[in-house]
Amino acid sequence: MAEQAYPPHLTAEQLSYLVTSFTDYSLSHGLVVRPVPSFVAQNPNNAIATTAPVTLWPSPFPKNLFTEARAIQTACNLLYARVASDESWLGELTTELSKVDDFIASLWAIHTRIKAESGYRHKYSLGLFRSDYMVHTEDGKPVGIRQVEFNTIASSFGTLSSKVSDLHRFLWRSGAYPPTNLINDISLPRNEALERLAEGLAKAHEVYMQDVAPEKKYKLEMSRTAGPTESFGIMFVVQEGERNAFDQRWLEYHITEKYGIRVFRISLPEIRKYTHHVRPNYELLFVPPHALSSQKQEVFEISVVYFRAGYGPDDYPTQEEWNTRYFLEESRAIKCPTVLTQLAGSKKVQQVLAGKANLEKFITDEQTKERVFDTFAAIYPMDTSEDGLRARKLAFEEPHRFVLKPQREGGGNNIYKEKIPEFLESIDEETWQGYILMELIHPPEVENIVMRNGQMMQGKVVGELGVYGTVIWKDGGDQGVKAVYNEEAGVLLRTKGSSSEEGGVAAGFGCIDSCVLVG
């Protein structure tokens, strides 16, 4: 049988039927985002939503590389838990970065202040991580996956990614897709990111409950039938005016409905109004807004603080927000992430770990170390070391091979190819060491149709596979990290036009996709 074009050519009538099925399913199943800010005036009380940017078809992805990316995630979880727990090693890198990066300096200052004043009250840390990869090709053939970055804070779009997978499966099963050689029930893997990420947060709640009240022998199974856990809950720290609220809401709904755990959403500027500490144990107590004026106030102890804000300087416009982050950090609640875990996700750490001698400090098993190391692209420092001076030379003489990255999350921060020399010349040379230089990955191009704001855009696209992981650990001091929960937690495929350099969905560059496995 001759190889069939993918996606297949559709008549106008077929395409209209498919788009209608696509749109109705997306709206019916909460696969939505809030409109762009320019639309706010027409959207009173946030009552209007639009379909999230999504591909009309699942994109082909090599099955063996998809399997390998997921298989090594628990090793990556432990790697970054160990980095976050090695205060000396992480502190040495962070102290140098702090000289040229005020944001990193402010995060590190929270850690040093807590160590000097009250000491940490939490015993456990929670990571909801995401390791992002691209397929790397040589001479047009896939040769492996290469890690783009490792996210330790606000790793988003897991729940909407699950729903995109369900959407594409529905379109196949319902007949909205015409028959193709690629798509079938086996080639469309189910994505359980929503369930697994929610489970990670619920497990952290369980750990907290067992720690504060061991005599109750709290289990998640008990809470499913007993109703909401009395006087305890999880706090989501969110951005004001969050467009991506529904991705977060689905986590909230799943945690509440499956595990019976209350979830409270609150923005960083509002936290001090509704929360306070109880000493000497620094329990974090929350009074819901509706209870502030009540004679008999409801008060809830927060078990887990989950940051979906706080990952960039824009979330800290004044010192008050930094004081709030310190206030949360010194509490007894389990943080996702702690400031140390957030710092562990810096691009500088990624660059240093790409050296095998540094990697083996945290991964002792030889086979595991090699599998993780094989995913690393070439990454260079931009300091005045021998490697850094070589990188500076490459940045000016061969910029077309590289991307320059700062210590930032959220998309839209990187400098690509020929723009690198001009950018470096525009900033103080002393600040160059706050960046890393990463060799570009060359992913395969595939054809697809992107649906964004009701518009169809067809052309060549490239994908970036994110693999989620959930890990709960306790720093055992000289005994090392003790993980009490460590799981791979589903995937996110982000797709962008092949000519686009950035890929962040929330930043407006990419869209959510799912994989149709090939090979």
Image: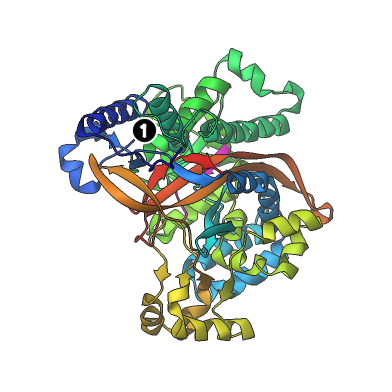
Can residue 156 be seen in the rendering of this structure? no
Label 1 sits on a secondary structure element that is loop
The amino acid type of the residue labelled 1 equals: Leu
Q: Quadrant of residue 290?
A: top left
Vertical placement of 484 versus 229: above or below?
A: below
Q: Position of residue 261 (x, y in %)?
A: 55, 25
Q: Position of residue 412 (x, y in %)?
A: 38, 61
Q: Is residue 297 left or right of residue 482?
A: left
Instruction: Name the residue at the top extreme.
Output: 225
Q: Position of residue 226 (x, y in %)?
A: 60, 14
Report the front residue among 510 and 216.
510
The C terminus lies in quadrant: top right
Q: Is residue 467 left or right of residue 416?
A: right
Can residue 381 be seen in the rendering of this structure? yes
Instruction: Name the residue at the right extreme.
Output: 479
Vertical placement of 30 versus 357: above or below?
A: above
What residue range appears in magenta? 304-311
Q: Colour scheme used in the picture?
A: rainbow
> Which residue in the protein does label 1 denote?
31
Vertical placement of 457 versus 161: above or below?
A: below
Q: Is residue 345 left or right of residue 355?
A: left
Report the front residue among 249 and 179.
179
Q: Is residue 41 left or right of residue 471?
A: left
Residue at (43% x, 48% y) in the render: 494
Instruction: Name the residue at the front extreme.
Output: 1
How packed is label 1: few (under 14 Cα within 10 Å), some, or many (20 or more)?
many
Residue at (47% x, 73% y) in the render: 402
Residue at (60% x, 68% y) in the render: 351
Residue at (35% x, 43% y) in the render: 242
Instruction: Name the residue at the left extreme.
Output: 42
Q: Position of residue 293 (x, y in %)?
A: 37, 28
